[in-house]
Amino acid sequence: MKKGDGSLIKKAEEFAEEKHMGQKRKKTLFFLKEDKMKSIIFDSSSLISFSMNGLYEELKKLKKIFNGKFLITKEVKVEIIDRPLSIKAFELEALKLKELLDEKVLEMPSALGVNENEITEETKKMINLANNTFFEGGKQIHLIDAGEASCLVLSRILDTKKIDNVICIDERTTRMLVEKPENLEKFLSKKLHSKINFRKENARYFRGFKIIRSAELVYVAYKKNLVELKNGKNVLDALLWAVKFKGCAISTEEINEIERI
Amino acid sequence: MQESENVLRILKETKEAIKEEDNIKLKNLSNQTVHTASVSQDPENIAIAVIVYSLSKILERPKYREYSSSEKLFNEFGICIDNLIIDIKEKNSKRFTKELTHFRAKINKLSGKLKIYVQEVFRKASINKASRIYEHGISMERTAKLLGITMFELANYAGQTGISDVPESNTADVKSRIKLAMEMFR
């Protein structure tokens, strides 16, 4: 794939179509059987939930049992490390997250041979697409920014490299754009008290991403006995509410459902 | 600046509300700017939303009157709002932007505890407005950038609201998402 020639977008369309036909799952299972590389791509919001709850050890333990890479993009690094390092209130969180990067718990995409300039180039296109999808009174609504878009781009690049991946993202808008853009249309219309025009033809570029949140990861940590708190069901409840209170977009109803599983 | 007619109305009503020391009216006026700010994402609109909300919070707490220079500060805020109104009427957007910068500069020129108090009110107002814009469907990163705050501040504040407890937020089946996460760790 050549850099910056728009081929990633074409690949994305093909991938989305494939997934639509149910072939993606078969491929995923095949690669898992072959013990191929896999990856979790972290957006800023999900790492902020872990960080502000002090769940660094849990993240390290999750990485230990994960046969793959925990990745962040350059754009996400700016939001969770570079910028907060200069702000006293969040300097400690930034240092702790930097340590995770130094210890290779988190890694940059180059760890999987992905060219970071390619991500930056494709991110510009992804931002442009996302922000030209919903309109109010003829005006485009600028929905997402570089960190969020770069995670989507990295996921697509890993798809083309046949590396199984999921994006861990706690903030709501990007998840809605990817999983149910029609919900986002409804929601924007309700909140802005206005008719929203949804350029549906753009939606195909956002299909096929696999999304989890910090909530699902703390569930995995709990189920795999990686949380060193011994208080039965309360631990899971505490973990789920903790990430919700630090910005993970999960509803009370969803928390209750997870606890019933 | 976008939606200048709306901003003009809000500024005129803000002036009245300050005179009447009506913090509830100021809060409502600030909320009215959120819809516009979410779509236009115009820095001037956002600055007005933060200023009006901050004024409402300052007036809400009688504590500000304890500071000797607080009356002078409110007079200066009043002059700034008058100037902003003139700038909109004269369609002088450059002067409008400059006046908004002056507004912030006046706070930075304050001294002692009043400066710390007012700066804190403005910082919290920025986080509050960011949370409202995020609530309107703009992403967390985009909103934090618009308001000049960190995503840490926004996530912490937004997490304590009911933002994610809306039906449209449920975009996938809970069990499927858990299954997906568990499968990745197999």
Image (cartoon, coloured by chain):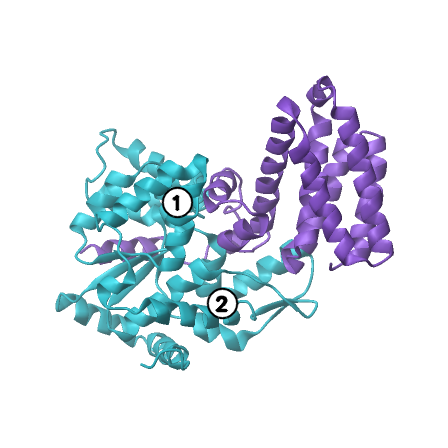
Chain colours: A cyan, B purple
Q: Secondary structure at mark 2?
A: helix
x then y, percent, for residue A132:
57, 71
Q: Residue extending furthest left?
A: A34
Mark 1 crowdedness (10 Å alpha carbons): few <14, some 14-19, many ≥20: many
Asked if one can make out residue A241 in the rendered structure from this viewpoint, the answer is: no
Q: Which residue is mark 1?
A: A48
Determine whether, in the image, residue A102 is placed left or right of residue A252: left
| Residue at x 56%, y 55% (from the top left corner) | B137
Specify the quadrant of the image occupied by residue A247. top left
Q: Which mark is residue A127?
A: 2
x then y, percent, for residue A87:
45, 39
| Residue at x 25%, y 32% (from the top left corner) | A232
Question: Which chain's residue wears label 1?
Answer: A
Count of numbered marks: 2
x then y, percent, for residue A28:
23, 69
Residue type at mark 2: give it. Ile
Residue type at mark 1: give it. Ile
